[in-house]
Image: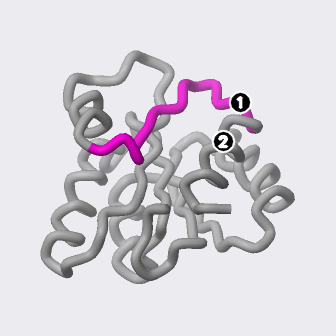
Amino acid sequence: MCADENKNRALIADDEQDVLEMFQAVLSCELQDCGVDFVVNGAEAVEAFKSAHHGVIVVDVNMPVMGGEKAFEEIQKICNAENLKIPCFVFCSGADESASIKKIIAEDPRHSVLRKPVDPDDLVRILKDRLGL
């Protein structure tokens, strides 16, 4: 399990409206006992995390304003400053992960990558696993 405060709360950050709509539809059925918040970029993800301390964060790697890697770095800083355990990160990308994402995952296998297009079953499985459901 991955979280300190809101272990049953997930945050989804993706700038593609159709992806967000699919995630909302799937997760509203499959994770009814968990809170799920949706934002459209990494900067909004950082702000949402500040107030809710999500247990799992699913981020698109490439988003306007702030991408997933930078959001990870900013949330990691918050966790370090507030002595919180960093949430599980699931990086979503249509391309191969960067060297820095590979390093993040190698250092902490709670983090992972989902390839786009994301299979809804894979999303549900990984979220349930990371949320300890």
Using the image, determine if residue 79 lies above or below residue 39.
below
Location of residue 57 in the rendering, given as x and y in whole percent from the top left corner? 47, 56
Nearest to the observer: residue 20 or residue 97: 97
Using the image, determine if residue 105 lies above or below residue 102.
below
Identity, as a three-letter code, of the amino acid under mark 2: Leu
**Residue plotted at (19% across, 78% down):** 83
**Residue plotted at (74% across, 37% down):** 120
Identity, as a three-letter code, of the amino acid under mark 1: Asp
The residue under label 2 is: 123
Of helix, strand and loop, which one carries label 1? loop
Location of residue 94 in the rendering, given as x and y in whole percent from the top left corner? 50, 21
* Residue range of the region highlighted in magenta in the rendering: 108-120
Distance from the alpha carbon under mark 1 to that under mark 2: 6 Å
Q: Which mark is residue 119?
A: 1
- Does 104 sit left or right of 92 as displayed? left
- Does 58 sit left or right of 61 as displayed? right
